[in-house]
Amino acid sequence: ASNAQFTTVFGDMETQAREALNAIGQEMDIVPERLQGSFTQMASFAKTSGLDTAEALDLTSRATRAAADGAAFYDKSIESVTESLQSFLKGNFANDAALGISATETTRNAAANKLYGKSFKDLSEAQKQLTLLQMVEDGNKLSGALGQAARESDGLENVMGNLKQAGTNALSAIGQPLLEMMIPVFQT
């Protein structure tokens, strides 16, 4: 199901999206399958906000890197930080502290004015997401979190997450042939 969603969301850009996901995984030493679900969800939401597929892929790649750096810096799982980031990009500003920033009306307006020359409330939904993501990226840079995922790729949280995903991948590989044999039995 995860691969089908990925294909549906990225369409003609599936190869580029897969390459981007694999590059992030390699850069940060994270098994790409750990990132795929949230990567797909973020891109899907970005597209519903008005971004085209290429723009959604760019936003998603940036957001995934920011989440990985934040997770390493604050010693949290990539999954929990990605969830907080997705919620934040959807407008749940209460998640700002979980991302290491302060997203008050004043700071959102300052970021929007810097990027687009207008108040946050006057931005399109896509511009709002891009502004919020820029705030997280800027926060990572100022706090020293930028690049932290690559520096801490051998940390316990990441290693355990990768091991868990490797186990899931192995079970999936073993289970697929069994499933294919069993489907005809269940269909009769």
Image (tube, rainbow, N blue to C red):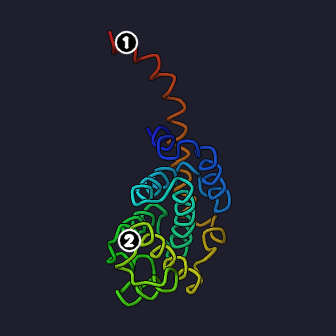
Q: Quadrant of residue 166?
A: top right
Separation (CA) of disc 1 from disc 2: 46 Å
Q: Residues within 10 Å of mark 1 (few under 14, many from 20)?
A: few
Tell me the quarter of the picture where residue 183 sits: top left
Of labels 1 and 2, earlier in sequence is 2
* Residue 64, numbered label: none
- Count of residue discs: 2
User: Residue sitting at 47 percent across and 37 percent down?
Assistant: 4
- Residue beneath label 2, please? 88
Question: Within 10 Å of the Cα at label 2, are there few (<14), some (14-19), or many (20+) other Cα atoms?
Answer: many
Residue 90, position in %: x, y?
A: 36, 66
Between 127 and 167, the one nearer to me in the picture: 127
Residue matched to label 1: 185
Percent across and percent down for residue 5 are 45, 42
Say which quarter of the image contains residue 57: bottom right
119 shown above or below 172: below
Q: Is residue 164 above or below residue 141?
A: above
| Dot 2 amino acid type | Phe
